[in-house]
Amino acid sequence: MNILFFLTPKASCELLYDDESIREALERLELSGFTALPIINKATGAYRGTLNEGDLLWAMKNLCEMDLRLAELHNIMEITHSHDNSPVSASTDISDLFHKALEQNFVPVVDDRGTFIGIVTRRSILRQYLDSLGIESGQ
């Protein structure tokens, strides 16, 4: 089975761009309802890392002194990431994808040039597995 079967394409992903401020990232993360989002470069499409709520909290404390006005002055790439979700290539073996999904809520997928093309969520893998067993996934 090809990992692209599980892919949520970039156009359907909530994501951050590496030129956004901490305040923009806070607002985007809040609106998305997710606890972590991939960061990509707007010009090249390259995957730059993962930003999660904890990273933003510590950045607000350490870089912005808990002041939202200061959060507009700092770029998200100034934030130390506690954990970046490791990307896989579109040609990655399905077993390697599953092992990564054990450790990450989502797995970023890049093409041969390192351009971000989407994510594979743990949910999409489990949903497919339940479907293959004939069990309703109960969305």
Image (cartoon, rainbow, N blue to C red):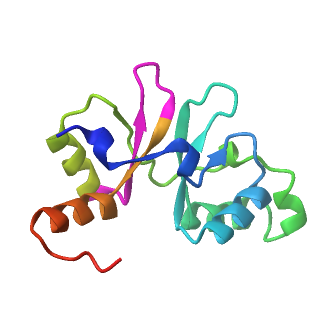
Residue 72: name its quadrant: bottom right
Q: Residue 63 vs residue 100: left or right?
A: right
Report the quarter where the C terminus lies: bottom left
Query: Residue 2 at x, y = what percent?
Result: 22, 37
Q: Residue farthest to the left?
A: 133
Q: Residue 84 vs residue 123: left or right?
A: right
Who's the residue at 69% across and 27% down the image?
43
Whether residue 83 is visible to the viewer of this picture, yes or no, is: yes
Residue 46: name its quadrant: top right
The residue nearer to you, when weighing 86 against 61, is 86
Report the quarter where the N terminus lies: top left
Residue 62: name its quadrant: bottom right
Query: Residue 64 at x, y = what percent?
Result: 79, 62
Residue 76 covered by magenta stretch:
no
Query: Residue 77 at x, y = what percent?
Result: 67, 43
Who's the residue at 15% across and 75% down the image?
135
Who's the residue at 14% across and 43% down the image?
95
Query: Residue 68 at x, y = what percent?
Result: 84, 67
Q: Residue 54 vs residue 87: left or right?
A: right
The residue nearer to you, when weighing 47 against 82, is 47
Q: Residue farthest to the top?
A: 113
Who's the residue at 17% across and 68% down the image?
130
Q: Residue farthest to the bottom?
A: 138
Q: Residue farthest to the right?
A: 69
Q: Which residues are magenta?
A: 103-116
Position above or below: 49 against 65? above
**Number of marks in picture:** 0
Residue 113 covered by magenta stretch:
yes
Whether residue 38 is visible to the viewer of this picture, yes or no, is: no
